[in-house]
Amino acid sequence: MADRLDQSTLARRQDYDSRVSQCLQEQYAPHSTCYGCGPANAQGLHVRSFADGELVVADWTPASHHEAFPGMVNGGIIGSILDCHCNWAAAWHLMGRHGLSQPPCTVTATYTIDMKRPTPSAGPLRLVARVVEANDDRCVVEGTLEAGCRITATCRGVFVAVKPGHPAYHRW
């Protein structure tokens, strides 16, 4: 993955951002208490993911209590926001693949993150996720975290749609 974004990508993102208001979490899981992305968790991170063609994108602004040291975001917070965001990319993809009116509840099966450089806490961060492989009940998703148009972390994970009987089945 490239470390810098081109101007056409930035312009497309700005146009897209001006057209959306309700995120996937608010549309499909308004009562979710997930720490990373649950709209109903008052102390959560409140990642708000939006479908944009084959991508799922989000902007998230850290606060000082999300820092590992002054001016830089904690690695665990980075992992949490990327994990939740990529999970929603998988759920959105499976929803479309199966023609569902609601996304299936998905959970993380495996997940890796690669910190490319420190992530500054000043200003918004951009999350971008894309499904790179899929079958009937799981997706491999790759994601990036960007600060100031520079990629600071990448990730790759497998996200699985759960069935009745799984503890997370009814969480959405």
Image: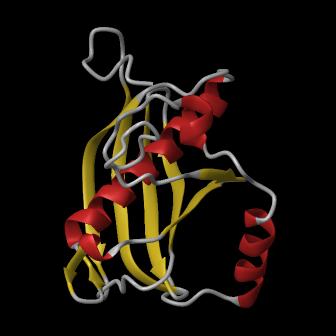
Q: Is residue 165 above or below residue 5?
A: above
Q: Residue at x 59, y 41 (%)?
A: 24
Q: Residue at x 46, y 54 (%)?
A: 47
Q: Residue at x 51, y 59 (%)?
A: 129
Residue 51 position within the rendered picture, expressed as x and y whole percent measured from the top left: 66, 50
Q: Is residue 114 above or below residue 82?
A: below
Residue 168 position within the rendered picture, expressed as x and y whole percent measured from the top left: 31, 23
Colouring method of the image? secondary structure
Residue 97 position within the rendered picture, expressed as x and y whole percent measured from the top left: 63, 31
Residue 33 position within the rendered picture, expressed as x and y whole percent measured from the top left: 35, 35
Q: Is residue 76 above or below residue 160?
A: below
Q: Which residue occupies the foreground of this view, 70 or 169?
A: 70
Q: Is residue 83 above or below residue 96?
A: below
Residue positioned most to the top: 165
Q: Residue at x 68, y 88 (%)?
A: 6
Quarter of the picture containing the C terminus is top left
Q: Which residue occupies the foreground of this view, 170 or 109?
A: 170
